[in-house]
Amino acid sequence: MSLIGFSAASPLDRHHDPLPKVTVPALGEMKRQGKPICALTAYDYATARLVDEAGIDLILVGDSLAMVVLGQENTLAITVDEMLHHTRAVRRAVRRALVVADMPFGSYHGAVGDAVSNAIRFVKEAGAEAVKIEGARVEMVRALTDAEVPVIGHLGLTPQSVHRMGGYRVQARTADAVLQLQADALALADAGAGAIVLEGIPREVAAAITAALPIPTIGIGAGPGCDGQILVFHDLVNLTFAPAAKFVRRYADAAALFRTAVERYREDVEHHAFPSDAESYHLPQSARGQFLATGQKEIANEEADSVVNADAREELNQG
């Protein structure tokens, strides 16, 4: 275990002039002012803290952690308890950004009451400030809003519908599909959604929906006409070990950085170059001489015991 840890109190001192806390109503105000909303995913304390300190407005604890953190084939296997665990870790790190938790597959696909209970767990147990659900679940959004749980909608390419869609395919490519998507977005806004993620749709469609909605849109693979953008943190820094989607821009190569660091560490250990004397602890000078003298006597006794057992030593002494 590292002896160097994060201080629980240190986030309070991170900014000399902290920006106001981002809330769901604040996202609406950003849309009205024409200020772009910047969002990223995060799944643990360290990355969430870095993302928050960089001034990101919204942090999504996405169910994509099933794939990029836990190595699952898709997002469907992640559980409520796993999502709660990661949401708690993220919430501890964040001062300013709005923390949104993805409702995982199966947690809101049954009775409305069960979905509300699951959503309340994210707020009550994990500190989420909003939840995100996929699809045109208008009555679900209305029920969650009535239960005082802010909701972010998600339309277009919805990863939890991967089997129905036959893979991760661009959506709303026909006139009928576009009209349905527009109607769904307006219905979600009317039901109380605070914002809507638009994923994997033509930029023209996303721009039209954004212009028609009274609430913000946050795009991912939906072009530049949305009110904000979101990417997966691990895509941003090349930690996904998979070809990037068309809409992903990689801003750093953390995989190369980490791999080089680990290889250098292994080489130093193998060549006895780590740890050095400067990286080792030392006895105080006042105790060193006494310890070494005691240690030498103990070593001498151990060597004698290893060569001569008690009976042989007694016979030797008698002789």
Image: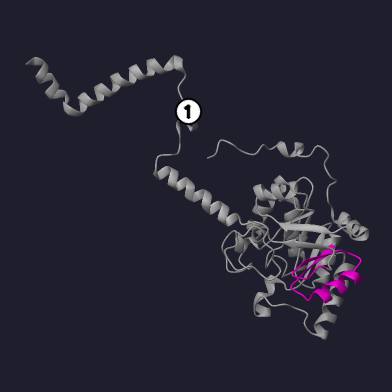
Residue drawn at (55%, 39%) of the image: 2
Q: Out of 147 and 33, give the one closest to the viewer.
A: 33
Residue 288 image position (x, y, % from top left): 41, 18
Q: Is residue 90 visible?
A: yes
Q: Amino acid at mark 1?
A: Tyr
Residue 132 in picture, x, y percent from top left: 76, 63
- Disc 1 packing (10 Å; few <14; some 14–19; many ≥20): few
Q: Is residue 53 left or right of residue 311?
A: right
Residue at point 44% right, 43% down?
268
Residue 131, image quadrant: bottom right
Helix, strand, or loop for circle 1?
loop
Residue 294 x %, y % = 34, 18
Q: Which residue is mark 1?
A: 281
Please say whether residue 283 is one of the residues in the magenta stretch. no
115 left or right of 193 in image = left
Image mark count: 1
- Residue 187 in view of the camera: no
Q: Is residue 27 above or below residue 265?
A: below
Q: Residue at x 83, y 72 (%)?
A: 206
Task: Name the quadrant containing residue 186.
Answer: bottom right
Q: Nearer the viewer, residue 271 or 289?
A: 271
Q: Is residue 217 magenta?
A: yes
Give the color scheme: rainbow, by chain, secondary structure or one colour.
one colour
In this rendering, position of residue 65 left or right of residue 181: left
The residue at the point 82 percent across, 41 percent down is 18
**Span shown in magenta:** 195-224
Q: Which residue sits furthest left?
A: 319
User: Which quadrant of the figure contains the C terminus?
Assistant: top left
User: In this picture, is 81 found above or below 133?
Assistant: above
Judge left or right: residue 6 versus residue 295.
right
Residue 50, given in percent of the width and then of the height, sits at: 70, 48
